[in-house]
Amino acid sequence: MKLPVTLAKTLKSKPDETQLGFGTKFTDHMFNMDYAPDKGWHNPRIEPYGPVAMDPATMVLHYGQGVFEGLKAYRTASGRIQLFRPQDNFRRLNRSNDIMCIPRFDESLALEALKELVRIEKDWVPRVPETSLYIRPTIFASDPFLGVRASHTYRFFIILCPVGAYYPEGFNPVKILVEKEHVRAVPGGTGEAKTLGNYAASLLAGQKAHDAGFTQVLWLDGVERKYIEEVGSMNIFFVLDGEVVSPALQGSILPGITRDTVLQLGRLWGLNVAERRISIDEVLKANQTGRLQEVFGSGTAAVISPVGQITYGNQTVTVGNGQVGPLAKRFYAAITDIQYGRAQDPKDWIVPVV
Ligand SMILES: Cc1ncc(COP(=O)(O)O)c(C=O)c1O
């Protein structure tokens, strides 16, 4: 594929790699592509990074018809740049499209375009250990129209953002609050799509939890408020007597790529891995009987986020003495070693770029 490329006339100065943080600095170029009913997806191109001009009636602003993804490019010690499971992100983006009535795009074209964009921006992939280049593909409804229906036109863009180490001060367990009032998603809803409204729906509970001194919300199912679904915007794992459990995907949980990586590695290592419903009562009882060994979240940003404390109403339980458990450490090390090229890739997950 020959992608038209318009290079930026002036380049931004690169940020201090020891002070990157997350989501604030963006590279010099972006990928763009448009959709129109008579042309399908067309005009893929790489252009200077810049604002998207919008009519105030642009449908995504009113009805939230939009989807996005999050993945990363990593620099290895030998200077190679590589992506981790990008095909899975584009596959998930198309599944989100199906749920949100957005037309599917060609996943192999998107991957080639992403590789080309990262090649152009290779100097933006930071070198400091555990830093990376975060990648945000986004699709939004672009008809200037008021009235609830699916848009006829769409814009697909990819932007890039150098990000710092998620654990600059070390791998510390977090305190989470079980959310009893608000729910993130319901069966039959849009919970398994990576779509805008799911994040908007999570804000109030997240804000209340932060104000009460917690790092994340533990989401329960939207019907019985009994079964555990996700933690913040991560998937969740429990280790109960050696069994590694993640809630089964039943339509209201985002199928995380890190979640799938943990499940596949766990099986490869011969662990007892299960995807099943798990209730908050089961977790509290397991804690009382000494069977609850570890709890951790999984997601692209943090990879693994150990949980040290869970509060449910007026009950607070400490997990694994508040220390990071051995499996959380093992999964974190194994996944980051593959991503940064320090270990053999057991499953063809790595896609080299440069
Ligand atoms: C709601 C939600 N759940 C889970 C995840 C974890 O998914 P992944 O491992 O693909 O980053 C994310 C992050 O993308 C998310 O936004």
Image: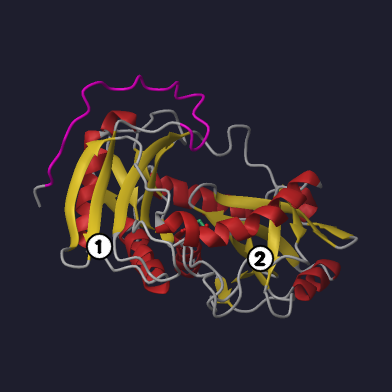
On screen, residue 265 above or below 27: below
Residue 341 appears in the figure: no
On screen, residue 104 above or below 42: below
Quarter of the image for residue 161 reads top left
Q: Quadrant of the C terminus?
A: top left
**Mark sitting on residue 107:** 1
**Count of residue discs:** 2
Which amino acid type corresponds to the residue marked 2 in the rendered image? Answer: Phe
Q: Nearer the viewer, mark 1 or mark 2?
A: 1
Mark 2 neighbour class, 10 Å CA radius: few under 14, some 14 to 19, many 20 or more: many
Which amino acid type corresponds to the residue marked 1 in the rendered image? Answer: Glu
Q: Was residue 4 drawn as part of the magenta stretch in this picture?
A: yes
Front-most of residues 111 and 83: 111
In magenta, the rendered stretch is 3-24
Residue drawn at x 25%, y 47% as measured from the top left: 32
Quarter of the image for residue 235 reads bottom right
| Secondary structure under the numbered disc 1 in the rendered image | helix
Front-most of residues 287 and 125: 125
The residue that disc 2 covers is 238
Residue drawn at x 37%, y 48% as measured from the top left: 55
**Mark sitting on residue 307:** none
Q: Position of residue 142 (x, y in %)?
A: 34, 56
Residue drawn at x 38%, y 29% as measured from the top left: 127
**Is the C-beta separation of discs 1 and 2 under 8 Å?**
no
Answer left or right for 207 relative to 190.
right
Q: Position of residue 300 (x, y in %)?
A: 48, 51
On screen, residue 31 above or below 154: above
Q: What secondary structure predominates along the stretch shown in magenta? A: loop
Q: Position of residue 179 (x, y in %)?
A: 75, 63
Q: Does the residue tagged 2 have its C-beta within 8 Å of any atom of ligand 1?
A: no
Answer left or right for 13 relative to 287.
left
